[in-house]
Amino acid sequence: MTFETIIDRVLMHEGGYTAGGNDPGGETKWGISKRSYPKLNIKALTRAQAVEIYRKDFWNRLKADTLHDGVAFQLMDFAVNSGISTAIRYYQRALNVADDGHFGPVSQKAAKETCEPDQIMRLLAERLEYISKFTNFDRFGRGWVRRVAENLRYGAQDS
């Protein structure tokens, strides 16, 4: 699976422009938020610009090209939805290593030694645990759970 296939999947979850409202990220387009990119004109952001941000600031930081394809997608989607550091920490929990938010040699070794289906299932379980603790789960939880349900389907297809 290529980065392009993975980012297409991720962007199917991320809608067009929103002015912010109740979103803690504020103004958002293609999942890129004003909170994370305060100098960026979010409203004018193109899909191609968003894809390049995701490649440079997410994909590369996650070292996603070193992972099983299905895991790369799951981790990328989690990072887009909840932040890179959060996604890495919960991925590390799924790998049973210290969750320090740094995808270093210990985490990379664990990823190489753990089969893809186990990684996907454990990561999605960690993600559900994470989102279930949000105080605004009653308002937004249904959408988050549907996103993870779709990712479970992808996980079955990918592994």
Image (cartoon, rainbow, N blue to C red):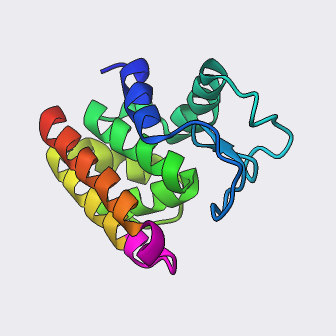
| Image quarter of the C terminus | top left
Residue 36 in the image, given as x and y percentages of width and height: 72, 49
The one nearer the camera, 42 or 86, is 42
Q: Is residue 149 above or below residue 71?
A: below
The one nearer the camera, 141 or 97, is 141
| Residue shown at 51% from the left, 76% from the top | 136
Q: Magenta region's main secondary structure?
A: helix
Furthest-right residue in this view: 39
Q: Is residue 63 above or below residue 91?
A: above
| Image quarter of the N terminus | top left
| Residue shown at 18% from the left, 43% from the top | 153
Q: In the image, is 38 to the left or to the right of 65?
A: right
Residue 51 is inside the magenta segment: no
Q: Quadrant of residue 37?
A: top right
Where are the magenta residues, as a range? Answer: 130-140
Q: In the image, is 27 to the left or to the right of 152?
A: right
Q: In the image, is 65 to the left or to the right of 154?
A: right
| Residue shown at 52% from the left, 57% from the top | 82
Residue 52 in the image, given as x and y percentages of width and height: 62, 23
Residue 14 in the image, given as x and y percentages of width and height: 49, 40
